[in-house]
Each structure stands twice: as structure tokens, then as C-alpha cells.
Image (cartoon, rainbow, N blue to C red):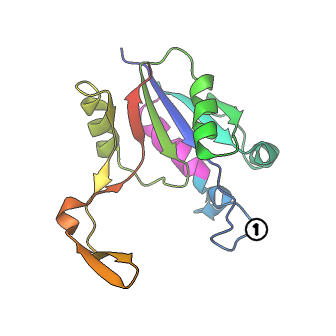
Amino acid sequence: MIRIGVVLVAGGSGRRMGNKLAKQFISINNKPILQHSIDLFYSWNRNIQLVLVLPEDQVAYWKSINDPTTLNYTICNGGKERFHSVKNGLDALDNVDYVMVHDSVRPLVSHEVLDRCLASLQENTGVIPVVSPTESVRIIDGDNSLHLDRNKIRIVQTPQCFHYD
């Protein structure tokens, strides 16, 4: 059986949204967005090993609004940058074959996408879901505006998936 680790990175502060509450804690349908993401992965596969990475100063708040014992997951502290937070999450995993690193405020990824990522890891060491842009895309270079062929562009999504080793 393939052992899957999921690292949910929840390091946002909500500054860009102009909100005092970090976006992962905003409630949708009476549940924090972060809980929707946790539920998404456990509804996809109950056997995953899930690590939730939060800024140290947000851990107590998360525990106060949610009971972390309802599902078996580990909470670890984030780092200064996303790289450090992901590294902390990876270090908290134990004996997994594959890893999925996912942004905690993106709870709408489908089970089909997760299945396709997992299947792709059978043949590849790393995979990421991507989408094609529908908008026109330009590069501004000084006074020049350069057209880009959107058929050659992909927008990277999460989860970012790879072999743990």
C-alpha cells in the first residue's frame, strides 16, 4: 500500500484581503476554510498522514476554534518563508512514499485531480496540476507591451506532489 503524506500549509495573514483574521480561519458554511481543506483530503483518503503547518502565533487560535483530536493529524510551526514552512511539514512526516503539499485556503480541488496526481506519481518523481489561462497575457518591458501565446502558458496549482525520498 502506498503511504501518502499531505502537508497543508496555512501561513497566510490576510493582509492582502484587508482582513484582521487570517484567511484560513474565515468561516464558510459555519466552518473555517482550513477545516474544509482538512475535510477534503480525509474524504479523499482516510489513510493519509496529514501535517498542518501554521505560524506559531496562530496555533493556539486554531486549537481554540477546532478540536484537533477529531481527526488524526499533526500540527507543526511554520517558518519565516513558505520554503521553511514546507520543510518543517516534511520533517514532521513519518515513513511516507509520496507527498502532496497543498495551500490550505484552496479547499476546492477535486478528488479527480488528487487521483490523477497520485496516478502520475507512479511514473514521475514529481507532478503538479496546472490550468490554461483564458485571459490575454502580456509582458510589459519599459514602453513595450509584448503579447504572449496563452496556449504556451500554464498556471501552477496545488497540490505539488512528489516522491518523499
User: Which of the 4 quarters of the picture holds residue 94?
Assistant: top right
* Quarter the N terminus occupies: top left
Looking at the picture, tell me which residue is in the foreground, 157 or 116.
157
Chain part drawn in magenta: 34-46
Q: Is residue 54 left or right of residue 37?
A: right
Say what amino acid the circle numbered 1 marks.
Answer: Lys
Q: Is residue 149 left or right of residue 37?
A: left
Q: Percent x, y for residue 80?
A: 70, 44
Residue appearing at x 42%, y 47% in the figure = 158
Residue appearing at x 30%, y 52% in the figure = 130
Q: In this view, does 86 lie to the left or right of 153?
A: right
User: Which of the 4 quarters of the picture holds residue 78?
Assistant: top right
Residue 159 on the magenta segment: no
Q: In this view, does 164 lie to the left or right of 62?
A: left
Residue corresponding to mark 1: 20
Vertical order, 108 against 151 (above or below)? above
